[in-house]
Amino acid sequence: MRHTTTVLGFAVTLAFVAGMALSPLARHALPDAHAQAVPLAPAMIDLAALKHVDIPGTPNPEMNARGLVITDNATIGIQSGNVAKHIHPKTDEIQYIIEGSGAMWLGAERKEFKPGTLIIIPKGTAHGGTLVTSGPVKALAIKIPPQARDDVTFVN
């Protein structure tokens, strides 16, 4: 019995040490985890009809968001509300303003937008911190590649 306990303890310790040694390698060998893409199906979505309350809330109390299309290469979602100024180090973002107007940070400048504005946000570009003049602001957001959960850094 004592021999079995010693062998078991040694095996568990060896497995733990091997896991610790291999985990950094696995982090680089495996791609970032993204939502599982499902085959696209034909659909029509009336984005103008979606109201802020119809879009699910997020951990940010001022922002509601819902994924509409998820592929291995990009995601398309609808978002309504506001988020503090931030960057995505690994993800390009394109927003199309559906409704609402105001001004937001885009890089080092505050830029005005209105319905019909297309906003191109290369990865690493600070954006957000919207001042709403008419709202809530509703936008179609395209993320290329799909944004990982840890790909957001808030900035001042």
Image: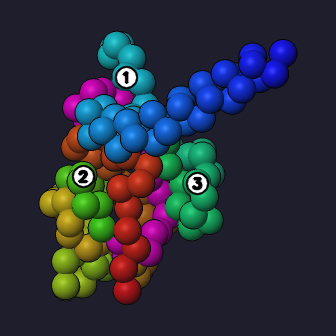
For marks 3 and 2, give the CA distance: 19 Å
- Label 1 crowding class (10 Å Cα cut-off): few <14, some 14-19, many 20+? few
Q: Position of residue 93 (x, y in %)?
A: 24, 54
Question: What residue sits right under mark 3 in the picture?
Answer: 58
Tag 2, which secondary structure? loop
Tag 1, which secondary structure? loop
Magenta residue check for 14: no
**Nearer-N-terminus badge (2/1):** 1
Q: Is residue 97 above or below residue 126?
A: above
**Which of label 1 and label 3 is nearer to you?**
1
Q: Which mark is residue 63?
A: none
Going 50% across and 49% down the picture, which residue do you hit?
A: 65
Instruction: Tell whether 136 sits left or right of 106.
Output: right
Going 20% across and 69% down the picture, which residue do you hit?
A: 125
- Judge whether residue 142 can be spotted in this image: no
Residues rendered magenta in the picture: 69-86
- Label 3 crowding class (10 Å Cα cut-off): few <14, some 14-19, many 20+? few
Question: What residue sits right under mark 1 in the picture?
Answer: 37
Q: Position of residue 97 (x, y in %)?
A: 30, 58
Kindly give the residue lying farthest to the front in the view shown: 3
Looking at the rendered image, the quarter that the C terminus falls into is bottom left
**Nearer-N-terminus badge (1/3):** 1
Q: Amino acid at mark 2?
A: Thr
